[in-house]
Amino acid sequence: MQLWRVVVCAAVLAVVAVAVTAPALCASQRAVQRPLSDFLDAQAPLGGWGATCCPAVGGWTGDEPGTHPRPRTTWGGIDCTGVVERAFRTMSPDLSFPDLGTTLEGTVTERPLDTDHAEVTVVLHTRNALAWAWTVPDAQALFGSDPSSVVSGGEPALGESLLHVVFVNDGGLGAPLPCLTQAYCLGQITYLGLQARATGPLHAAFGVAEGTGGRMTIQQLAAHGLAGVPGKGLDEYGWPVETVSLQAVGPAP
């Protein structure tokens, strides 16, 4: 009888312990909001693909999927994190870089996975972002002006973008966030989607009169870590969608 009472008491105490600790465990898994600046400040102002950090999200498009870079294709970029304008205007005040009126708004949501890792979701809406496009590999300007050309007086093309990226961050909740290129190269990104549209001048290399009004549309979708999975519609780089399209929308000047 005494043993039965001990077992019953132990069972009751176990149920109470679970009831008390369960809310705490659930609370520890709740998502928290971080300042948008935590993400923006982590995007390095200098470099390109393969360097310290890419200042703008770009994409490839062509007729030969699975080949990077593709022969005579189009590279398009948009300053979706605002880092290009910020770098030129604040770090190089001696350069004549115009105020483009770039604005950014969005959210950074962090959810703990374990004590050493957190899942971070960034949604970023950018307006009046610098955009440009050129050919690869010969780098002929097709649309807008790259940052250096803007400094030299080139007419900028401006656009709007929506970036949605999800990545696993080392260090747990509150750890410093990586730049996008670091996260991608280290395999931390689990989802990256970008939609962007910009208007500005087209160049003669596009096959129209110099200065003809044009529009660039970028659609990018990365499923990093799924590269080469049969039936997923991915190339070996894990990008099921990567398009940069240009079209003339205005009369020749």
Image: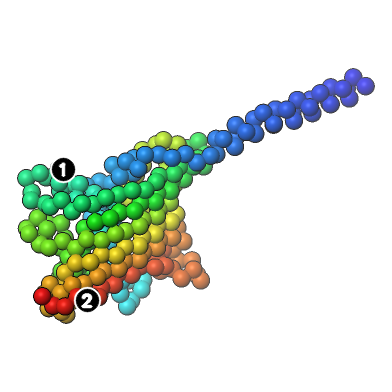
Check disc 2 and give the amino acid type: Ala
Please identify the quadrant where the N terminus is shown. top right
Percent across and percent down for residue 79 are 25, 55
Determine which quarter of the picture holds residue 64: bottom left
Instruction: Say if residue 91 shows up in the picture.
Output: yes
Check disc 1 and give the amino acid type: Thr
Give the secondary structure at mark 2. strand
Percent across and percent down for residue 225 are 45, 58
Determine which quarter of the picture holds residue 169: top left
At a point 15% along the width and 74% down the height, the residue shown is: 212
Residue for badge 2: 248
Percent across and percent down for residue 65 are 36, 73
Looking at the image, which residue sits at the far right? 1
At a point 16% along the width and 78% down the height, the residue shown is: 251
Residue for badge 1: 90
Residue 247 — which label?
none
